[in-house]
């Protein structure tokens, strides 16, 4: 199957060790593992919008919620990937937005 190439966003969320334990044993780092992130508002929102058929937001193309392997940086820690469509237009960067007048932001 051939898929059309189109731009998308692919944020990765990976648990990292607590500061100061980066080079500790895998057992120490595994003791810090959280199987799921405490908050992933993007994924929660995209799932709800997709289920309800909302067509005015980027399309959720897929996601994977997994755990890091025994040789990863935080064994057993969360490892989540989300993929969604990039919508047409330019990103509204924070620096750009706040430099506009109130009328320009409207």
Image (cartoon, rainbow, N blue to C red):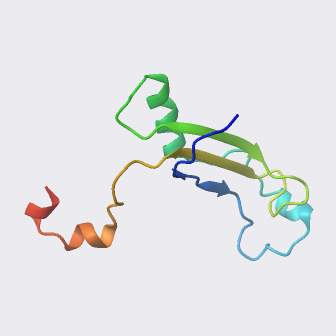
Residue 91's place in the image compared with 78, above or below, is: below
For this view, does 101 lie left or right of residue 37? left
In the depicted view, which residue is nearer to us: 34 or 10? 10
Q: Which of the 4 image quarters holds residue 28?
A: bottom right
Q: Classify residue 44 as left or right of residue 93.
A: right
**How many callouts does the rendering have?**
0
Q: Give 44 or 7, whichever is nearer the viewer.
A: 7
x and y percentages locating residue 52 in the rendered image: 43, 22
* Front position in the image: 36 or 87: 87
- Residue drawn at the location 48% of the way across and 28% of the way down: 50
Check the picture and name the quadrant holding the N terminus.
top right
- Tell me where residue 40 appears, x and y as whole percent: 55, 46
> Image height check: is 7 above or below 17?
above
Instruction: Name the residue furthest left.
Output: 103
Q: Is residue 74 left or right of residue 53?
A: right
If the image is split into quadrants, where does the C terminus sit? bottom left
Q: Residue furthest front?
A: 2
């Amino acid at each position: 199957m051939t898929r059309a190439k189109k731009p998308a966003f692919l944020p990765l969320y990976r648990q990292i060790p607590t500061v100061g334990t980066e080079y500790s044993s895998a057992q120490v780092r595994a003791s810090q593992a959280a199987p799921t992130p405490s908050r992933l508002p993007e994924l929660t929102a995209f799932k709800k919008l997709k289920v309800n058929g909302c067509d005015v937001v980027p399309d959720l193309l897929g996601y994977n919620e997994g755990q890091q392997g025994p040789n990863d940086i935080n064994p057993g820690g969360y490892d989540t990937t989300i993929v969604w469509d990039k919508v047409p237009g330019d990103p509204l960067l924070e620096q750009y937005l706040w430099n506009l007048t109130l009328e320009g932001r409207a």
